[in-house]
Amino acid sequence: MEQIFEKNSKNKVVRGAKRAVYEKDKVFEILDSGFLCHISFVMNEQPFIIPTAYARMGDEIIIHGSNKSRMLEVLEKGGEACVCVTHLDGLVLARSAMHHSVNYRSVVVFGKAREITNFDEKNEALFKVMEQMLPGRWEEIRQPNEKELQVTKVLAIKIETASAKVRMGPPVDDKEDYELPYWAGVVPTYNNYKRPLSDPELPGIVEVPSSVKTLLNI
Amino acid sequence: MEQIFEKNSKNKVVRGAKRAVYEKDKVFEILDSGFLCHISFVMNEQPFIIPTAYARMGDEIIIHGSNKSRMLEVLEKGGEACVCVTHLDGLVLARSAMHHSVNYRSVVVFGKAREITNFDEKNEALFKVMEQMLPGRWEEIRQPNEKELQVTKVLAIKIETASAKVRMGPPVDDKEDYELPYWAGVVPTYNNYKRPLSDPELPGIVEVPSSVKTLLNI
């Protein structure tokens, strides 16, 4: 049976409701296609946003940082989090100014966080965060030691509710504007990578690892 | 004289303070290099984030949407906004897991909004939003008519305070890890465009306009 996030006052898409997606597997697919999210939290009634790396682990969003982080402190104390992941897929160029748009896939997650303190679970969570940024990298490097695990705070934000918005396809203009002699269409956008820059401190020539080769298709 | 945003409890960068940037011109440069922001606001003590198009006009951030937008309603009524713009510049691949990072330029803006109701000012603001997405596009299309201006809400969020965080350059590892035989370096990332897809509804062949050609360098 297909699982969906029930609509409520938090996750219900008000604007552009026809672009709304509540199916859990589709929401998770969008979350799994990125590694950088924006997290919003409230401190002294003031909204804050911080961009940070994340991973999805089951129905939780993993984030990490230092013990000094204000965001982690607020969330750890039970503050509500709103997490947003956005993939830009294209510029939608219509015949009229007001129908210009972008193609995108975005997810908004609402939930509270728990701290992960168990070292094995913490290590697994940090592995997932790296795996989401660059699959295979974890096996190519020095993994966290006890001291590092101790000074790193790892939180798991429960995906209590969520929704996605997706726009794709060509522009949609007002009927009478289709007669205008203007070009309209989509310019697809994507995140691209350039050739890796080896750290100048490397001792001589060290081969680029397979995680990077796979990413760059080289 | 160089202008800076005075540090206060909102804009002060707590984590990674050495990456903090408070110079107004540098903050503005980062804001001017994008067209998609994330806006956070508080509704019933709950934080929300919405990704949206923006432009910087002087010391204001312009956003727009329909009269139905919850976000615009909250901000119009005097709710505090936090606006974040993030440019991802590279994957920073260190010798140890915990020193992995990303190169980025991000700005966080704090302020309250005013509604722009004057039609000329509104038109100018919408022009700026389009110009920031695709310079030159405004002249190639049907510009907003009175009815469209009437049903579109345009807000200007005052950049009351702001700060940026910038990381660039190679990874920084713990001293003893430099002896490890692992590759380390940076994989630069950037937003790229593919060849435009003409709207299937175009009446025959319409030449791709100069805004798109300039963007794609074709």
Image (cartoon, coloured by chain):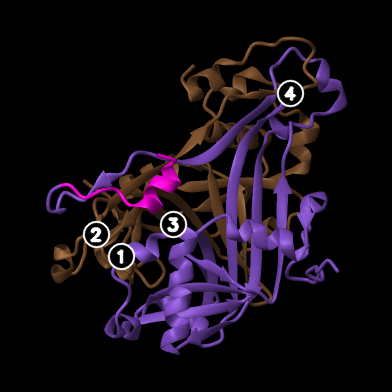
Chain colours: A brown, B purple
SS at mark 2 in the image? loop
> Which residue range is magenta in the image?
B205-218
Task: Give left or right: position of A136 versus B65.
Answer: right
- Residue B134: give its label: 3
Residue contact at pointers 2 and 3, CB within 8 angstroms: no
- The Cα atoms of the two marked residues, 3 and 4, are separated by 35 Å
Image quarter for residue A29? top left
Q: Do the residues indicated by labels 1 and 2 lie within the same chain of the protein?
A: no
Mark 4 = which residue?
Answer: A199
Amino acid carrying mark 1 in the image: Ile
Q: Nearer the viewer, residue A27 or A58?
A: A27
Q: Do the residues indicated by labels 2 and 3 lie within the same chain of the protein?
A: no
Amino acid carrying mark 3 in the image: Leu
- A104 lies above or below B59: above
Residue contact at pointers 1 and 2, CB within 8 angstroms: yes
Q: Nearer the viewer, residue A99 or A95?
A: A95
Mark 2 = which residue?
Answer: A182
Amino acid carrying mark 2 in the image: Tyr
Mark 1 = which residue?
Answer: B141
- The Cα atoms of the two marked residues, 2 and 3, are separated by 16 Å
In percent of width and height, residue B26 lies at 72, 58
